[in-house]
Each structure stands twice: as structure tokens, then as C-alpha cells.
Amino acid sequence: MKATTTWTQGISSVITDNRGHETIVDLPEAKGGQDLGPTAFELCLMSYSGCVNTIFNIVSKKMRFEFTALEVDTIGHQKDGAATFTDVEVELRIDTEASDEKIESCLEKTLKICPVGVLFHQAGVNTTYKIMRLQKA
């Protein structure tokens, strides 16, 4: 696995995964950037959200339950002027017929094996979670 970052202009860069995918990182205009993409720090939190969503999908299939909608928010906090995240809240919203217990079990298993979450945990970031059922329209 390899990532390559190439400066493009101003403060912005393009990051590639060397499999043909890329994203732009930049800073907001208020911090001297052109706001062409998320900051690298925001991308880190976005990665956690995406990882939880992906791993939850895999674990739920193994647990044999389906859902019709799944959304994951990650909210990062930097307490006491910390340079990085000190706490992350994971909010999972789901539409499923599965029991609350099954959803919670799946999320707990997900958080234990989500590679990005494991990195956050090893860095001492406290993670809490909340599960909400999506309302059918």
C-alpha cells in the first residue's frame, strides 16, 4: 500500500493511492488555502467514518442481517487545545428490521476491527458511539 502526494498550487496537493484514485487536500481560504478540498486532518476523520461504514457492512453480512440505509457520522473533538483529536463520537443511523441488540453487537465488533479506528485507539483517542434508527419516509 502506498500513497503519493503531489503539490499542485498554493497550499493544495493531490493525493493518489497508486491504484488510480485521487483526492485533493487544501486549507480553507481563512487559513491561506483555496478551499479546493478537505484538509488532511478532515480527511483523517472522513476516513474513520468511511471505515466504520465499510466494516459494518462486512460484519453485518457475517451476522446475517440486512439494512436498507446506513449513515455514519464521526465528530472529532480537540480538548484543551490539543493538536489532534482527543475524542471522536461515532453516530450510526440505520434502517433495518434487526434488533437493537444485533445492531449494537455489530457496531461493537466493527469498532474493534476497523483499521482506522484501531489507529485512533492506539493513539489514545477516546471513541464513543450512538445508534439511531432512520425514520422511514
Image (cartoon, grey):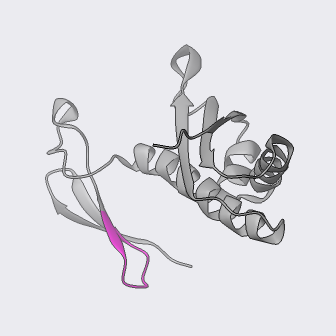
Residue 59 part of the magenta segment: no
Which is nearer the eye, 127 or 108? 108
Query: Where are the magenta residues, as a range?
Result: 15-23
Which is nearer the eye, 11 or 59? 59
From this view, report whether residue 115 is shown above or below residue 94.
Answer: below
Residue 19 part of the magenta segment: yes
Does any portion of residue 84 appear in the rendered image?
Answer: no
- Quarter of the figure with the N terminus: bottom right
| Quadrant assignment, res 113 | bottom right
Find the residue positioned furthest to the front. 137
For the point 22% across and 32% down, which residue is it?
Answer: 31
Residue 30, image x and y in percent? 18, 29
Please indicate whether residue 29 sits to the left or right of residue 21 in the image.
Answer: left
Residue 47, image x and y in percent? 52, 55
Residue 137, image x and y in percent? 45, 43
| Quadrant assignment, res 61 | bottom right
Q: Give the tally of numbered discs.
A: 0
Does any portion of residue 93 appear in the rendered image?
Answer: yes
From this view, report whether residue 23 is shown above or below residue 30.
Answer: below
Find the residue positioned furthest to the top. 80
From this view, report whether residue 35 is shown above or below residue 50.
Answer: above
Which is nearer the eye, 69 or 16? 69
Which is nearer the eye, 133 or 15? 133
From this view, report whether residue 103 is shown above or below residue 88.
Answer: below
For the point 26% across and 52% down, which residue is it?
Answer: 37
| Quadrant assignment, res 12 | bottom left
For the point 84% across and 65% down, which residue is it?
Answer: 63
Find the residue positioned furthest to the bottom. 19
